[in-house]
Image (cartoon, grey):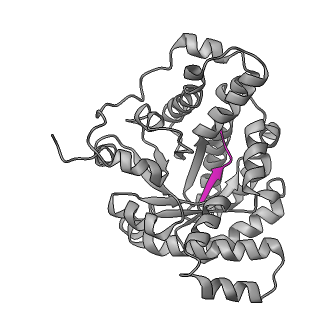
Amino acid sequence: MSEETYLDWISEKSNTNWWNDSGNPREIDFAIIHGATGVTTNPVLSFRALKVYEEDWHLDIKKIIKKKLNPNKKAEELMRIVVTNAAKKLKHVYENTKRELGYVCAQVNPNLSGYREELFETAKRYHSWAPNISVKLPGTYSGLDVLEECISIGISCTITVSFSVPQVIAVAEKYRKAVSKAKKYNIKPGRCFAVIMIGRLDDYLRDCAMDSRSGIIESDIRQAGLAVTKRAFKIFRNKGYQTTLIVAALRGIYHMTELAGANIVMSISPKYQELFLSNSIPYEEKIENEVPTDVIKRLYKLPEFVKAYEPDGMDKKDFISFGATQRTLSQFA
């Protein structure tokens, strides 16, 4: 049997990059050794990293506490410890790939998801921390406007709290506009990543199915996020979008294996990395395999699935009120 692991295969032959879904420094080191080209963090992951390695960072934490900052500023400064540590670890990847990879995502305050000016000011601060930081903005109407402004002045961004085809299309269109604006003023535009939180969408739709007594079975729910992601990927390819899709919040290895062959980034939690660091998973490209028509038909009983699946399922102004968005923002806050 070949010594090549599944992660080796997707990186070298299946056009898929993968990022470490954790701010934990030991887990980042492990992931980079095994081929990770980026790091994703969020408020929850940053908090966990700080708690686990509190002794390593206790002097920095103590200085922040002594400053008697307001809660929001204190949270930002604490997150800065985790994010800048990851940025240093990824600096060689960033430089070796000429700014294409090697990013760490730093998420803005989830309580500001509808506030353009505050989001933009936060993005500029985060960008000043390190050149390979991709500012995580929310997939809301406000977040999209700030994305355009950031990209046009050279700030790389990742749109998160995003679960749907209309959201990632809106990101890609904003990026096109921003790139044109940047080029007009001879500015190198920032990189742009659009997240689909595949497992969180499934989680939300599962609850919707239960609440509405739709009778939709678990095997259908497990394909909902895959259906959304496959559709988004094909639209991106057909339209030639330069925005990179990131698939996050995996709920099982099937979320990766069913998307193998796609030119995307997979954000992988350490608990799944061990499974992928084997050669026991069949090496098969499945991105072109359609989700069965009968499954889509049953999922259409859920209006929330239709919102996520159809390219025009939601208007930009509806992104912030989508159930999965509200649930995720609440947890991150």
Is residue 136 found inside the magenta-colored segment of the image? Answer: no
In the rendered image, residue 49, in percent from the top left (x then y), is placed at 57, 68
Judge left or right: residue 204 versus residue 250: right
Query: Image height check: is 36 above or below 90?
Result: above
> Could you tell me which residue is drawn at 62 percent across and 12 percent down?
297
> Could you tell me which residue is drawn at 63 percent across and 37 percent down?
169
Quadrant containing the N terminus in the rendered view: top left
Query: Image height check: is 25 above or below 302?
Result: below
In the rendered image, residue 232, in percent from the top left (x then y), is placed at 56, 32
Q: Which residues are magenta?
A: 157-163
> Could you tell me which residue is drawn at 58 percent across and 72 percent down?
82
In the rendered image, residue 29, in percent from the top left (x then y), is placed at 40, 67
Query: Image height check: is 19 above or below 60?
Result: above
* Front residue of 292 and 231: 292
> Could you tell me which residue is drawn at 58 percent across and 31 percent down?
225
Quadrant containing the C terminus in the rendered view: bottom right
Q: Is residue 164 visible?
A: no
In the rendered image, residue 114, in percent from the top left (x then y), is placed at 83, 53
Question: Residue farthest to the left?
Answer: 1
Quadrant hosting residue 220: top right
Q: Is residue 208 visible?
A: yes
Q: How many marks?
A: 0
